[in-house]
Image: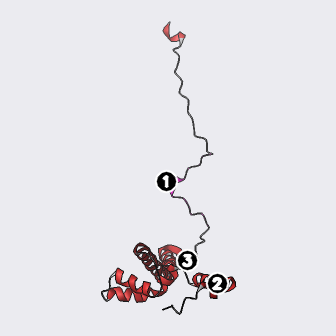
Amino acid sequence: MPDNKTVPPEETTSLEAAEAALDRLATKLAAPPLATQIRRLLPKIERALEAGASYAQVLETLRECGIEMPMTTFRSTLHRARLKRDRDEEGGRKRRTRIDSSAEATDRSAQDGGEGSQGKKRNPLAIPPRPKTFEWDPTERPQVTFVTKKKPDADQES
């Protein structure tokens, strides 16, 4: 009994065969990449795994739906999708933490003497005064004292 999906070669023209082949190609290319499909299905995959399904069972279910891939590809793609999800979730928190930490640093500098005792604001670009132990002027010439040996006087020997 002939299959309804197949048409005998004598009934199709080369133009119809080319159209069918191009339609299959367009359908194949229109499908999103595997990584995109796994990221989209990630919550449902995680729910199935938490319910007790094995990776093999999840992969078999995906294959039945037309998503074909080897087990190693499935595991690595799933791992990358989880990492991307975690990075995206933590990305907003990191930005907020960075902003909060800069605000804390500003508060801390105000407490540590950001304002002087007279209520003046400290200039962040001003060069701070050096401690007294480091006050040394390299252009100052040191005082040099020369020590000479006294020659014995000839007058005193005679």
User: Farthest residue toward the right?
Assistant: 15
Q: Is residue 135 covered in magenta? A: yes
| Residue closest to the eye, 70 or 115 | 70
Mark 1, residues whose alpha carbon is within 10 Å: few (<14), some, or many (≥20)?
A: few
Residue at image coords 57%, 35%: 144
Residue topped by disc 2 = 17
Residue at image coords 52%, 53%: 134
* Magenta segment: 126-138
Secondary element at image label 3: loop
| Residue closest to the eye, 94 or 67 | 67
Residue topped by disc 1 = 133
Residue topped by disc 3 = 118
Q: CA distance from mark 2 to mark 3?
A: 90 Å
Q: Is residue 20 covered in magenta? A: no
**Residue 147: % across, % down:** 53, 27
Left or right of residue 7, residue 38 in this image: left
Type of secondary structure dominating the magenta stretch: loop
Q: Earlier in the sequence, mark 3 or mark 1?
A: 3
| Residue 138 appears in the picture as rendered | yes
